[in-house]
Image: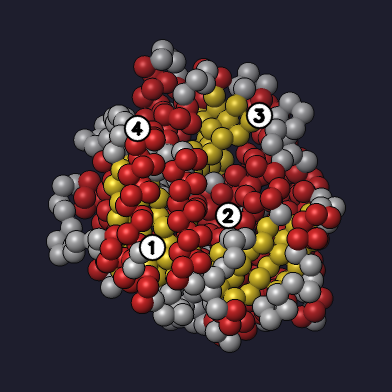
Amino acid sequence: MAERLWARDVTLWPGEEIAQTAIHDRLGWLDSPRWLVDHQASLTDWASYIRGRGFSQVVLIGMGGSSLAAEVLAEIFGPSGDGLSLTILDNTHPDAITEALENRAWSRILFIFSSKSGTTIEVQTLCAWVLDNLEEQGVAEPGSQCIAITDTGSPLARLAEQRHFLDCLETPSDVGGRFSALTAFAMAPGALLGIDLQAVAQSANDMAEHCSAQDGDANPGLSLGTWLAEQYLAGRDCLQLCIDEQYSGFGAWLEQLIAESTGKEGKGILPLGDAVSAAPESRVIKVVLGAKSNASFWHQHPETEGTTVPSRRISVETNTDLGGEFFRWCFAVAIAGSIMQLNPFDEPDVEATKVATRSLLDGEGLPGSCAPLTPEELGTCLASANDGTYLAILTYLPAEPALFDVLEDFAQSVRERFGLPVTVNSGPRYLHSTGQLHKGGPSSGLFLFVRSVPERDLDIFDEDFGFAHLNHSQAEGDRAVLAERGRSVSRIELVGPTMSCVAQLRGALAPMLRA
C-alpha cells in the first residue's frame, strides 16, 4: 500500500474515473516535505524582508485547513527572536471580530488572507471589511498591509493583484487544504513567527523517508493508518486524543484532518478530546501524544492505563519534530481511507451548508426547514440514545471563557448522566472540518446549536448584509441541513451582556439533564 500511495495509484481508493482523476489532483502533499526543504531558506529571507517593513503583529484570516496548521505553530512556538506575534481570526461573530482587533495599532498589523479556493465566504467578507476599515483610517494603499495565500489564478489572487497587496503567495493546486500543513499556508506564517524552518523541514523529510518503507512496522504512517482503519472496522469509531497541553493546538488540527477525511458515506472516525470519552470501551481507541521530556504527562498516561482500550503512544523529541507529525498523520489518514473504502481527499457534504447559507443571505429562506427540538425534547433524545450516539455542541459565540466553562460543565454532565461522548465545536470554523462528519458520517449524532446575538453589527463593504446576518445564516443553514438529513437538532439563543447570557445558558441547559 505504501508503494502504491507513493506511486499515486488512485485505485487505492474507490470511485469512478472522474473521482479518481480528482484524487490524483489532490496528492501533491506527498511532495510537500521536499518542497519545504527546497524553499525554507527563501521563506526565511522573505519573512525577514516583511518584518523589516515595520509590522509588529500578524492577523491571519482563514478557515479550516488554511489556518489551523498556522495556529498550531503560533500556539506552540510563539514569536521567536524578532518574529511577529500571530493571531488567527476564523470567526464571523461581530463580537469576536471586534475582540480580536480592538486596542491594536492597525497601522502596524500585517493581514494575511488565506484561502485555497479564494472563494471562502468568511475570508472574502473579512477581507472586504479590513480593506474598507484601513481606507477609513486614512491608509492610502490598504493592500500594502495585506498578503494573500491561495491557489494560482483564484479570485483571491486576482483581488491581491487589483488591490496591490504586499505579496501573494500562490500555492500548488494539487494540495487540499487540510493536507497543506507543510506548504506556504502554514510555513509562511511560521517564517514570520521566526521558527527554524530548516529543522521543521528536516523533520518532515525524515518522516517522509520513513513512510517509504515497505515493512509496516518500520513505516510510521502506514502502521498508524492501518491501525486506525482496522480498529474502526472492528467497531471502534471513537478516537480519544490525549494530547500534551503544550501541543493542544495540534489536537485541533488532528480533529479536522481525521473528521473531514473519514466522515462520509455513512462512515467516520469521531475525534474526542482528553476528557473521559464516556463511550463504551468497545467503541474507543486512544492516541497519546506528548513531549518526551514531559515526565508528568507520561506519568498521567502510563502504558498500563486502560489496557482494554487499544492505544498508540507518540513521543515528540523537540517542537520542530511536529513537521514530521504533520506528514505522518496525512499519510496515515490516506492509508486509513483506502482500507475504509472511502475517498479521504474530498468533502462532499460541506457544500450543502454553503448553499443553505447563501440562500438565507439572499433572502430566499429554506423551504421545508423544520422547527428545532426544544431543550426538553433533546434531553429525551439523550436519555433514550443508543450506544452509537454522540452529542455535538456547535457554538456561534465570541471566545468568552465564562460561556465555554458552562458548556464544558454541561458536556461533562452529559457524559456522566447519559454515558455519551460529547464534542464542543466552534462555528463557523467547524463547518470546514468536523461539519463534514456531522452531515456525511453516521446518522447517530445529536446536535445542539448555541448562538448569541451580537451587541452590535459590523457592516460588510459592498454587501447588503452584515456579519451578524452572516453568522446567523451560517448557524441556521447548517441546522437546517442537519435536520433535513434526519439528525436531531436543538438550539439555544442568548441575548444581552455576558453574565446575563451565562444565566440564560444555564437555564436552557438544565432541562436536558432532567430527562
User: Which residue shows up at 16% across the image and 53% down it?
Assistant: 365
Q: Between marks 1 and 4, how big is the CA–CA gap?
A: 25 Å
Q: Between marks 2 and 4, how big is the CA–CA gap?
A: 29 Å
Name which of mark 2 and mark 1 comes first in the sequence: 2
**Which residue position holds label 4?**
497
- Nearer to us of marks 1 and 3 is 1
Please, what is the three-letter code of the amino acid marked with disc 3? Leu
Q: Residue furthest front?
A: 514
User: x, y percentage for residue 462?
Assistant: 26, 32
- Nearer to us of marks 1 and 4 is 1
User: Which residue shows up at 66% across the image and 29% down it?
Assistant: 84
Vertical arrangement, residue 494 with respect to residue 312, above or below: above
Q: Between marks 2 and 1, how big is the CA–CA gap?
A: 28 Å
**Which residue position holds label 1?**
513
User: Which residue shows up at 39% across the image and 41% down it?
Assistant: 502
Please, what is the three-letter code of the amino acid marked with disc 2? Ala
Q: Quadrant of the N terminus?
A: bottom right
Residue 252 has which mark? 2
Residue 84 has which mark? 3
User: x, y percentage for residue 61?
Assistant: 48, 39
User: x, y percentage for residue 431?
Assistant: 41, 56
- Nearer to us of marks 3 and 4 is 4
Q: Quadrant of the C terminus?
A: bottom left
- Which is more toward the observer, 414 or 106? 414
Vertical arrangement, residue 480 with respect to residue 91, above or below: below
- Which is more toward the observer, 411 or 183? 411
Q: Between marks 3 and 4, how big is the CA–CA gap?
A: 33 Å
Please, what is the three-letter code of the amino acid marked with disc 4? Pro
User: Which residue shows up at 54% across the image and 46% down it?
Assistant: 67
Labelled pair 1, 4 in contact (Cβ < 8 Å): no
Please, what is the three-letter code of the amino acid marked with disc 1? Leu
User: x, y percentage for residue 449?
Assistant: 34, 55
